[in-house]
Amino acid sequence: MSNCHSVGVVTPQRVAFDAPLLLKSGASLPSFELVYETYGELNAAGSNAVLVCHALSGSHHVAGTYGDDPKTAGWWDNLVGPGKPLDTDKFFVVGVNNLGGCYGSTGPLSTNPVTGRRYGADFPLVTVEDWVAAQARLADHLGVGAWAAVLGGSLGGMQALEWSLQFPERIRHALVIASAPKLSAQNIAFNEVARQAILSDPDFHQGHYVERGVVPVTGLRLARMIGHITYLSDDQMGEKFGRQLRHGERRFNYDVEFEVESYLRYQGDKFAGYFDANTYLMMTKALDYFDPAFDFDGNLDAALARAKANFFVASFSTDWRFSPARSREIVSALLHNRRRVAYAEIDCPAGHDSFLLDDAHYHALLRAYLENIAV
């Protein structure tokens, strides 16, 4: 095995699909484009391909950098590369920006071929099932008959699970990390508050803000601030910020006084500068709608009976948004169906965002599982 290092400078690629895609909602996209990146080489048998699915605000840029700038490293660069747990000396790794995304794939910012204007709010709602159907088209384009593995965290883990159900013959291993079989009422509530922050912004203009030359910045900032609170654990926020005052004294006003306020505003401002509001609305709805057991009267055991893949399921002790209990629901249903499952409940203080971190124990578990995947 080579020493661990980056996959280096990478270049996004784009592919257009002209055949219509029928969506879960009943709507149809007449054509669409996906932006993706690949790392490593596809072997002659086409048997070493791994799909990495992104979470709510992620993208196709999983690993490597753009133009040798270390600040542009992919969002899971600590995991993917030569000698890393997802070893590109062994695997051909694919990252894709999902339909409806704002990083180049067809979405609300794209031109509607019917009107000649940006889709905006007219872009149809897409679901996890729709993303997987589109990813299957990409797999066909790349010559991948079946994935050695599909993995992702959070909303990405839902996609890995959906792959095992929608295309059970086209996935050998599913790695479902910090995820859930469906959102709890509390999670849906957080998403709704975030959406209302955007929908009530005067600059939203019913989703056609781009034509007005504005962005609903205030709504996006608030949505991100709400979301970010749920991604972190109470212990981590306490350790990182406590009740520290920025100026060492209380000033008795509504400006930023506590360090945690400063952090949340910074995260909100940064997010509003690059993410699309319509995409955020759509992604949170995709989260809300995901429920494989919906068509099985809520019976998850029956819903997962279609799966044929082997599974690695992981949760994190301080993740209260996608708690370990939710991962154990998936494990229980898979075991009921006599699937092979490896489950890890990892002690990590960082809350939901733990799945993105370079935690030694977590990465060792991933490495051990991935090393045992035959290609």
Image: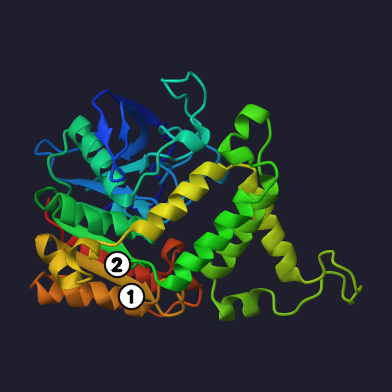
Q: Label 2 is placed on what type of residue?
A: Pro
Q: Which residue is mark 2?
A: 181
- Asked if residue 137 shows in the view, the reply is yes
Q: Is residue 218 left or right of residue 274?
A: right
Q: Is residue 166 left or right of residue 272?
A: left
Where is residue 203 drawn, in percent x and y?
69, 41
Quarter of the view holding residue 369: bottom left
Instruction: Name the one closer to the observer, 77 or 337.
Output: 337
- Asked if residue 370 shows in the view, the reply is no
Mark 1 neighbour density, 10 Å: few (under 14) some (14–19) many (20 or more)? some
Instruction: Name the one closer to the observer, 334 or 63.
Output: 334
Q: Label 1 is placed on what type of residue?
A: Arg
- Specify how the rendered protein is coloured: rainbow
User: Quick check: 104 above or below 220?
Assistant: above
Mark 2 neighbour density, 10 Å: few (under 14) some (14–19) many (20 or more)? many
Residue at 11% over, 76% down: 336
Instruction: Name the one closer to the observer, 154 or 281.
Output: 281
Quarter of the image with the N terminus in it: bottom left
Residue at 27% over, 39% down: 134
Q: Which residue is mark 1?
A: 326
Residue at 40% over, 44% down: 125
User: Quick check: 33 above or below 41?
Assistant: above
Q: Is residue 210 left or right of residue 305?
A: right
User: Quick check: 206 above or below 192?
Assistant: above
User: Quick check: 75 above or below 227?
Assistant: above
Task: Check if mark 1's residue and mark 2's residue have beta carbons within 8 Å.
Answer: yes
Where is residue 98 drawn, in percent x and y?
37, 42
Quarter of the view holding residue 17: top left
* Callout 1 secondary element: helix
Where is residue 234 drawn, in percent x and y?
58, 79
Where is residue 372 drawn, in percent x and y?
16, 62
**Badge number at residue 219:** none
